[in-house]
Image (tube, coloured by chain):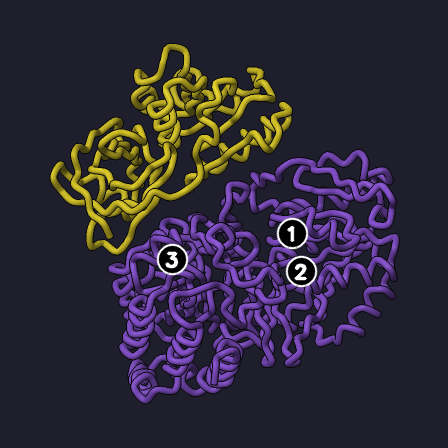
Amino acid sequence: MKVSISYPPIVNELGQKAMVSQNRNVQFFKEPTYLLPVTYAQAGTWLKNEGHDVYWDDGNAQLKTYDEWFADLVAWIPDMIVVESTTPTMKFYWQTITELKAALPDSIIVMTGYHAMRKPEETLDACPADIVLLSNHVDFALHRLVDFIAAHPDWRAICELEGLVIRQKADDLIASSGPEYRHTGSFRQVEPLDNSPLVDRDLVQWQRYAYENGNFLQTPGTYATSVIRDCMFGKCTFCRYNGPDLTFSMMSVERSLDEYQDLIENHGVKEIFDDSGVWYRGREARAFAQGIIDRGLHKKGCYFGINTRFEYLDEETIKLMAEANFRFVLLGYEAADDETLQRLNKGYQLQHVEKCLTWLTQYGLHPHLTIMVGYYWQTREQLDKTVSEVKRLMFSGLARTLQVTLCTPLDYTPYHRECIDKGVLLTDDYDDFDMSKLIVETPLPHDAYYQAVREMYSIAFHPRFILRQIGFLLRFKKREWQFLFTYSLRAIRRVRQHIFNLTRNETR
Amino acid sequence: MPTFKVLENRQLSEHTFCLKTERPSDTIVAGQCFNVGVPGSGVNREYSMYSDANAPHLEFLIRQVEGGTVSPALAAVEPGDPVEVDGPYGEFTLKTPDDSSLNYLFICTGTGIAPFHSFAATYPDIRYQILHGVRRDDEQYDAAHYPAGAYTSVLSQGAKPQCVTDYLKSHTVDPDTIVYLCGNRSMIIDVFAILRDAGVPGDNLFTEVFF
């Protein structure tokens, strides 16, 4: 079959592009960040390996306009088009699918993604998509589905593969009887993650994602095939990796090491980031770091980055990771008050934050904090505490970079459902969920949260912060010089953009 | 992080112990997990509860991991010592424990029996079978706590080594059974495949992977 995995360019009224890929909250950026959707890349690789004709169709990374993207896709005449949804892009996708169906009536359109999997009928009612996939394991689900459809012309009636909602008649949106859908049951992924192939870098044109990404201190950089699917914690209320239908699975250490070796030795990659919700910990983390050292990959001038949680990595592990040339460590620091962390089910305690950051910094890694503001309960005291703690951590050098977002309920996560249940959502227009403004009732005027965003991002320009970064030069490590002279220039460009994006709804 | 006193630290086998602590006042649902660690260590791990959700204490069934960070430290704590206990978290719970028409099959390996012990203690009226994969007979933790016939262990070491997958291949599972799986990843993967082949739908399968 001819299968297109498609990401149409989505451009807002300000000319900013939406960044959509798995585990990414949609945000619009003028300065682009191109993120490789790893699971979809594995899905495409799997289909290609099985002999299907796969069109990797990322209109954003391929720098196409919407019209160019649309024309190219229509000209390719796919048998199946796979798209990925999240709340703020739903209306756009419904319109796009309607247009695609008009131009390609015989193409099967599969809607995937966290929003649609929670509300499949909504999408089938709103547009002529043929299938909604009820799983984020698109690689495992798609390779079975495509094979089945290829072998069974009457697939709509007989397909029993679990995790699908199937439109029963192709043209039922205009039929007098109305649409009819068939659920094939819940999808429960319990297969070894090692069964899904490593990403085919040529298929996805990896170099298109290798430069415009703020996480890379050196380029070309790339995302590794994620070693963890879903999350080993999986209980944070605002996160998509939360739900009884999502299952944690882990790739073997040796397999991941093989990929790193290939990326470094055969692709010349200088920085590798694993965007697993939470990377290995404990025994596997140490085995991986030791494996990097044993293979001599720590001396190839390539940095490694991961996401982790506070309280997951101990000092011995961090020390070994530093030896293995890990650099970038991204940690969710959602707030600096216990009540918020408890409400979010974060599962870590503030008292351990400093210890973890101290270890990371002591061994030369660069901790990056991701902070959120604008929870529907967030008081002045809680907000001020978060701002002042973030300042303290940044000025003291315990954290090196940060990212602040407005907490936006999305994709019917527990936090989203909580906002609905408590009646604090200010809009039900999905276009408003693009994280550019607060959409929940809050104890403080929204401007207070926008000001907090501005204040935290402005740390990057503060003399105390800059002086502290200069102080790191005395470590005489290449990464510190790169950080100050290369990364800082890029960061400033991006920080200004973030401030603009997140405070443009502030009352002036 | 909230600290609670250790009430008892009971060695159950060479590598496994049952840690009994005071409990937080929060509502706890049987099968949920907690983050547990030694104060000041800066590192914690999630452990499923072992005890009755309504009991005045918490119990955790913990295997001491060789070269591990948290479990050896917890193995060394004594009654009266403080431990960090944060939670509860998670949804690995029985959805309708009051529905007496349901038949449950709890399949586990090693300390993966913890949430099922919690289910059994909290909901004594549910109809269940436990299939417990262990290496040796001293790992049949508190087998006497279950009603006669409700607990079956499969030993992977000894005269006739067997694992839960062997057992399942030679026994029939009613597709209407509600099956909960807890334990190591490879067991869950293998058992899942066997159950699917036996016609148990995905909606009837619930898993909790111990790393």
Residue drawn where x is 35% and y is 57% of the image: A341
* Residue A37 - label: none
Q: Which residue lies most toward the left here?
A: B80
**In the figure, B96 relative to A394: above or below?**
above
Q: Residue B7: which quarter of the image?
A: top left
Number of disc labels: 3
Question: Which chain is home to disc 2?
Answer: A
Residue for badge 3: A309
Compare marks 1 and 2 and give the one earlier in the sequence: 2
- Tell me, by letter, which chain the rendering colours yellow: B
- Name the spot of residue B171 as percent of width and height, x first: 55, 15
Marks 2 and 1: in contact by CB < 8 Å?
A: yes
* Residue A116 - label: 1
Compare marks 3 and 1 and give the one earlier in the sequence: 1
Q: Nearer the viewer, mark 3 or mark 1?
A: 1
Residue drawn where x is 51% and y is 27% of the image: B179
